[in-house]
Amino acid sequence: MQSIAMQYHHPGCGDVYDSRILQPPSELPARSHNNSLSPYYLLNNGKKVHVPWCAIARDQPAVEVEDGARLNARTCTHRHVVVLRALNTDGEWVHGWFAKRQSNLLERLTKRIVIQIGVVCSSERPDSSLLRLYPDAWYSRDPMDFETLAVIRFERKHTLLTEVALRAREETTKEKCKPSRRPTRNSTRTTAKRPREETCTVCMEESIEFSPKRCGCKTPVCDKCMGSMRGLCPVCDRGVLNAHFECHCCNSVDDMSNSGFPCITCGQGVLCYACYRGFEECFACDCIS
Ligand SMILES: [Zn+2]
Ligand SMILES: [Zn+2]
Ligand SMILES: [Zn+2]
Ligand SMILES: [Zn+2]
């Protein structure tokens, strides 16, 4: 019996495993690259870098600072702060505070303004999410400046989304050119041995579709059930079925149904559902981790 190496014990989630042990879901949920980027942008050496919607952690209410106005603690209060988030090289979210200009330019606040806004905010609105959830990256000991990190992340996202859009366009063209004849199901299936009908121990249905299991045990589980259990054996892996799995991008820990989705670059099923929806990459493909 091949046992699965346990990753670690999480005080809230119990046992946490590497999501690589999961088979990818047999049908991937739909996702769209359309409207992934917001109209807000940062400037990188004079070049616009659009901010993905998923990188905006806080933007309410939409109050803008006039384009020409200087940013200081008088022109910019906690109501003007837009918080962006980005994964650092350790796969942890870090946040940066920005002021939104009328032109949709997001401008990084200096540490001095951040402190002043924080002081006023903590006396006027002590329960503000700004202070509780999104402390500015000036206070983290990250070696990389937040804006540098954000620009790398957002430019990479732009490249990935462009590739996704290109592939989608190619696929529609291919689909149009393809002859209408579709291969009939199971017509090309070749089986070395004559399939024997057996009862699946999970659904109790008679079936002939039993692929070899990773654990190697002889418990008959039909392919359909194996698929819905994401390749885990109901006997050998029973302790894992209710466990949690770690995402190789954002390090979040989630149950089986929200884990094991493919990385946009290498295709390995190691991401959580949210990262899959956001066309993210695993740390093996990450250019800066
Ligand atoms: Zn079954
Ligand atoms: Zn087994
Ligand atoms: Zn994730
Ligand atoms: Zn990858």
Image (cartoon, grey):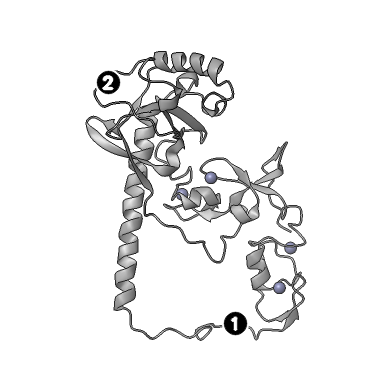
x%, y% of residue 117?
45, 17
Q: Is mark 1 within 8 Å of ligand 2?
A: no
Q: Looking at this rendering, what residue extends furthest in the left direction? A: 46
Quadrant in the picture for residue 27: bottom right
Q: Earlier in the sequence, mark 2 or mark 1?
A: 2
Towards the viewer: 93 or 216: 93
Towards the viewer: 19 or 214: 19
x%, y% of residue 158?
33, 46
Q: Amino acid at mark 2?
A: Ala
Question: Which dot marks residue 280?
Answer: none
Question: Which residue is pictured at 55% across the width and 49% down the height?
Answer: 272
Residue on which the image places disc 1: 192
Image position of 148 with respect to 282: above or below: above
Q: Is residue 143 left or right of residue 105?
A: right
Image position of 207 with respect to 269: above or below: below
Q: How far, Cα to Cα, is label 2 from label 1?
A: 76 Å
Q: Is residue 35 left or right of residue 213?
A: left
Quadrant that contains the N terminus: bottom right
Crowding near the residue tagged with mark 2, few <14, some 14–19, many ≥20 C-alpha atoms within 10 Å: few
Q: Secondary structure at mark 1?
A: loop
Residue on which the image places disc 2: 69
Quadrant that contains the C terminus: top left
Towards the viewer: 287 or 110: 110
Q: Amino acid at mark 1?
A: Ala
Marks 2, 1: nearer the viewer: 2
x%, y% of residue 226?
66, 67
> How many numbered badges does the structure rendering display?
2
Quadrant in the picture for residue 78: top left
CB-based contact (under 8 Å), mark 2 and mark 1: no
